[in-house]
Amino acid sequence: PDSPTQRVGERPASQFDSVRHNIPLYSLDNAFNIEEFTNWEKRWQNQLKNPVEPEYVCELKIDGSALALTYENGILVRGATRGDGETGEEITQNVKTIRSIPLKLQVENPPNRVEVRGEAFLPLETFDRINQDREANGEAPFANPRNAAAGTLRQLDSRIVDRRQLQFFAYTLYIPGEDGDRPFHTHQEALQKLQEFGFLVNPNQTICRSLEDVAQYYDRWNEERRQLPYMTDGVVVKLNDIELQQRLGFTQKAPRWAIALKYPAEEVPTTVESVT
Ligand code: IVH
């Protein structure tokens, strides 16, 4: 099942099955400026008995489509869309076409089960090429790379998905076992482990220990993201300490230990040419 010949299926699927996620996929709460971020920091600090010196991992927020991957004895057995967070669609055949997703974990003795979460996305160059082809064929172009990635993942024919050349950045690792799902101390250790397993982890993450550091990272990437070959719509700030993450837990929909610090949506003028 991990042979490179297995990356593309021979026969198109007739439809996708629904799958219940072993561990739900949470969303993220949003902040739109440093003041809102400061309020979030106060909220999680107030939840603790004693204040702690925060250590955050700041990451880019990749504007793509979330995937849940399951490995059994080191072999990729399932790839699913996020869906509503509880139930998604089983798109294993399509996920296998993504070259940055290992079909087999690159370690000697892999854990029995591994769950990986991350973002599938279309590089901007590929997005432009797909839209040029679509327009040449008289098809409507995709509005943005996020829609194009989501649409591509739900293609029934994995040969088409293969041609679209999706990419994947991994950002969450679960290794279910006796000591819980997170047998490491920090989020950065998990990112390191994901790399050892053969995943692509976005290299532009950094530790921030103060509001000023976070604000600087946020401002810096608002400029530099224009040079990146993929779309980002903000940064994600996560507490690095897994034990602290576990103490803070989740609300109905999102972790209390992480927040998306978003950039304002891009605005472009539209001319209404006629109304019929
Ligand atoms: S962490 C419980 N990290 O943003 C942790 N999400 O708006 C939840 N996303 O559904 C996710 N880049 O699809 C995380 N570096 C990143 C991310 C990221 C993009 C997406 C993810 C999530 C959505 C929430």
Image (cartoon, grey):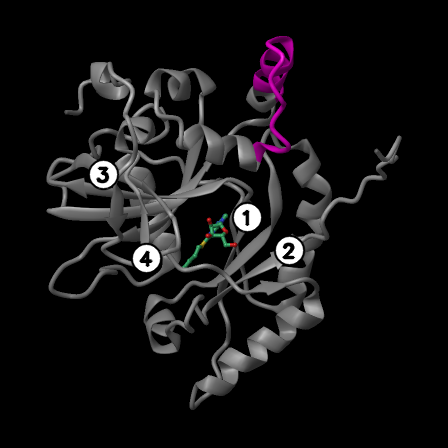
- Looking at the picture, how far across and down is residue 48, in whole percent? 43, 86
Identify the element where label 1 is drawn.
strand
Q: Is residue 134 magenta?
A: yes
Residue 237 x %, y %: 53, 60
Question: Which residue lies at the image location 57% right of the left edge and 75% below the top edge?
Answer: 41
The type of residue carrying mark 1 is Lys
Q: Callout 3 environment at 10 Å: few (<14), some (14 to 19), or many (20+)?
A: some
Residue found at x 62% / y 33%: 144
170 to the left or right of 34: left
Of the residues tagged 1 and 4, which is closer to the observer?
4
Q: Position of residue 10 (x, y in %)?
A: 24, 14
Find the magenta span and give its range: 128-145
The numbered mark, 4 or 2, whose residue comes first in the sequence reads 4
- Give residue 86's mark: 4
Q: Looking at the figure, which quarter contains the N terminus?
A: top left
Cβ of mark 1 under 8 Å from ligand 1: the answer is: yes
Residue 265 or residue 206, whichever sits in front: 265
- Say if mark 3 contacts mark 1, CB within 8 Å: no
- In the rendering, which numbered label is found on residue 61? 1
Q: What distance separates the C-alpha of mark 3 from that of mark 1?
A: 24 Å
